[in-house]
Image (cartoon, grey):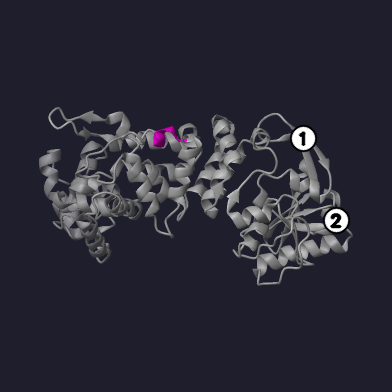
Amino acid sequence: MAILGSNKQAPAIAPRPIGRRGELALGIVQRLQEAGFPAYWVGGCVRDFLLEKEPQDYDIATGAPPEQTERLFLRTVPVGRQFGILIVVEQDYRFEVATFRAEADYQDGRRPNRITYSDATADAQRRDFTVNGLFYDPVRRQLFDWVNGQRDLRDKTIRTIGNPAERFAEDHLRLLRAVRFAAQLGFQIEPGTLSALQTFAPKSVQVSAERIREELLKLFRPPQAARGLDLLRMTGLLAHLLPEIAALIPCEQSPDFHPEGSAYDHVRLMLELLPADAASSLPWAVLLHDIGKPPTTTRDPITGLPHFYGHEKAGADLAEAVLMRLKFPRKQIDEIAACVRHHMQFKDVPRMRKSTLRRVLMRPTFPLELELHRLDCVGSHQNLEIYRLLVAEAEQLRTQSHLRPPLLHGHDLIAMGWPAGPVLGQVLREIRERQLEDELASPAQARAWAQEQMAGRLGAKPEPGSAK
């Protein structure tokens, strides 16, 4: 880790590859400096640079006022001009360029009411955490540390800049960011910062749902998803932001099926087992798949063991409510809720009719459901027999492409003489069932079967030529 010991200006840092985005960010700083304005990389990109990670974004702070920045660059977007913030677009990459500023009079727990342009040292003091308060001049390759951020990077510590109570009172989003950075970086939260975070945890619900969602999406990415859950619980944020998950903590389960412990222990273990390339909806399917257990808990009168009859249906309704509260996209809500609703169905796979199993395999959400099922098994009883059966059946279905499109549609039956209505729909469903049971294999066979049914179901024969 390329961290230096000085608190202020460090010696030049040896260059290393920074990629195309980094080269463009360097060019922006260089152009600002050539125009006579101080300019630095700031925040997360400096932190990641020093941790020898490839930064995902480069933010730039400068002494240039917004109107000067606009004159220097061809493409700018005034996303927060009242705060001195512009987006500079270079070769379709977007870079946030902000004028050095000091902030005061926070009243809504999110935005300052008073902004004054300042210098780099004052700009560093207004930032959230010391590890995000470092400034780096990529032209001269010099690091500037006015907040002891290098010390906390070296000690793997998340600490607010200044008084933690004041920092969290100013901006409640920092509560979630502290947890997210600690999880992502594998850092500890400094005791004073942690104490203030726990005190201010109830204020987290005042943050907009969209911002909460974005922080939680980052928090629950593998491989830090389980640690993210632990930190939410430890700080008290879990009970306020995801009370449905907090309700899993005391939810006991049968040791025969869940030797790992409570429903919370089960979910936590599944998060720990998430693959690195997990689909974006999978952590949420894991988090929410058992939230129907607490409200459906009953006790066996003889053994005293808990039962959770219907928890998948109750859980799907709760999951939808949680995701709507967090303003998830409708398509993703439906996808995750479907996984919750169906996750208990897989236990019946060995006894399913061929047509029923094939319908399961053809569901758009099946790949996500299958991975949820695998994690559900590995995170509990570790029996993967049904998982392996499903994988084999899905592979076989891939070679049977003729089964996916229905043999006939409504207009085909109407052309044969069937009137529109409930009977037509029933016949279509029966044709589909027989197709999936391998009893009908072609449109011609389906038409012949439908024609045989007409006399009995309609009390009349089709007109000559109606089946053409």
- Please, what is the dominant secondary structure of the magenta stretch? helix
Left or right, 183 with reference to 264: right
Q: Residue at x 25, y 60 (%)?
A: 391
What's the amino acid at mark 2? Arg
Name the spot of residue 45 as percent of width and height, x first: 66, 58
Q: Quadrant of residue 126?
A: top right
As drawn, 125 above or below 3: above
Residue 192 percent location from the top left of the image? 60, 39
**Quick one: 364 or 421, which is closer to the camera?**
364
Secondary structure state at the residue bearing disc 2: helix
Position above or below: 171 against 433:
above
452 sits left or right of 218 in the view: left
Q: Which residue is mark 2?
A: 71
Of residues 254 and 222, the one drawn nearer to the viewer in this rendering = 254
Q: Which residue bears the numbered disc 1? A: 104
Closer to us: mark 2 or mark 1?
Answer: 1
Which residues fall within the magenta stretch?
A: 242-246
Q: Nearer the viewer, residue 131 or 356?
A: 131
| Residue appearing at x 71%, y 54% in the figure | 134
Q: Quadrant of the N terminus?
A: bottom right
As for residue 455 lying within the magenta part, the answer is no
Residue flagged by tag 1: what amino acid is it? Ala
Would residue 339 be seen by someone viewing this image from the given angle?
no
Label at residue 63: none
User: Disc 1 on helix, strand or loop?
Assistant: strand
